[in-house]
């Protein structure tokens, strides 16, 4: 499976009105730097009922999407320094646990995971999709208007399994992975060191 969802969203003000409990919490925001991520801390923080603030039980910080403020779109997850900086900035801005979603296409994911844990991450989400492309041979054009997108589903499982294994060894934190389609897949992830197992694309395949 390949997709390119992008960073389209209505912004923090609109999202916060939808996040008030007991309604489900959902939504993602794009950012250009760590400070930008934290400008919304007045909205994304625990608050009393009717307080006009989002009240998440935790926040997943997706540092593995392209950084739109970077000339080359390099993700924050591309280096220990940038990954840790964003994690620390968000952690200082909110009271709830922060979960950091890492990218698979980095030289040393274990080192980056250790850096974000040291910076205050309560857990690691491993992993985001892997960049890829599919071309329609009839038209000669990429099937995605974005040209490239993220590969997920069964093709991602061996990569996710390796990442979970490498992250789990040095990091005393929970690890959630991508790429599960069967119970056997889930068992493999737990054996590799995952504490939690996520199911995404399997829902698309199986309903």
Image: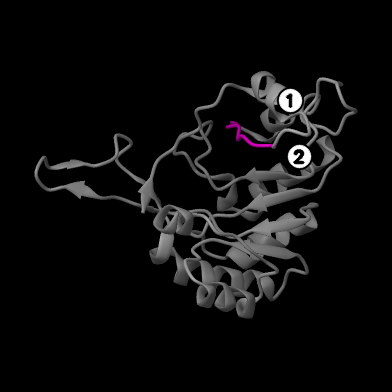
What colour scheme has been applied to the protein in the rendered image? one colour
Query: In the image, is 177 to the left or to the right of 50?
Result: left
Residue on which the image places disc 1: 39
Where's residue 176, x and y in %?
Answer: 64, 62
Report the magenta stretch's main SS.
Answer: loop
Q: Is residue 27 magenta?
A: yes
Q: How many marks?
A: 2
Q: Does residue 68 lie above or below 177 as drawn? A: above
Which residue is drawn at the image coordinates 36% and 50% (left, top)? Answer: 2
Picture quarter containing residue 168? bottom right
Q: Is residue 132 magenta?
A: no
Where's residue 125, x and y in %?
Answer: 63, 57
Residue on which the image places disc 2: 90
Mark 1 closeness class: few <14, some 14–19, many ≥20 residues within 10 Å: some
Which residue is drawn at the image coordinates 45% and 54% (left, top)? Answer: 207
Query: In the image, is 153 to the left or to the right of 134?
Result: right
Q: Residue furthest right?
A: 48
Q: Residue furthest bottom?
A: 191
Q: Residue furthest front?
A: 207
Q: What kind of element bears circle 1?
A: loop
> Magenta segment, which residues?
25-32
Which residue is drawn at the image coordinates 42% and 60% (left, top)? Answer: 153
């Amino acid at each position: 499976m390949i997709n390119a969802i992008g960073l389209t969203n209505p912004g923090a003000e609109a999202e916060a009105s939808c996040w008030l409990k007991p309604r489900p919490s959902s939504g993602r925001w794009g950012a250009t730097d760590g400070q930008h991520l934290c400008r919304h801390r007045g909205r994304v923080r625990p608050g009393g009922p009717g307080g006009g603030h989002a009240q998440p039980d935790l926040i997943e910080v997706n540092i593995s999407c392209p950084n739109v403020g970077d000339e080359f779109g390099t993700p924050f997850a591309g280096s220990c320094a940038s990954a840790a900086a964003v994690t620390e900035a968000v952690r200082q801005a909110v009271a709830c646990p922060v979960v950091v979603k890492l990218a698979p296409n980095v030289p040393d994911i274990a080192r980056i995971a250790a850096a974000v844990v040291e910076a205050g991450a309560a857990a690691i989400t491993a992993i985001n999709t892997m960049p890829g492309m599919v071309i329609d041979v009839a038209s000669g054009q990429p099937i995605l208007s974005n040209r490239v997108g993220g590969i997920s589903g069964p093709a991602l499982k061996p990569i996710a399994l390796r990442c979970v294994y490498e992250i789990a060894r040095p990091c005393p934190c929970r690890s959630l992975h991508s790429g599960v389609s069967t119970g056997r897949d889930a068992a493999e992830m737990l054996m590799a060191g995952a504490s939690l197992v996520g199911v995404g694309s399997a829902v698309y395949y199986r309903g």
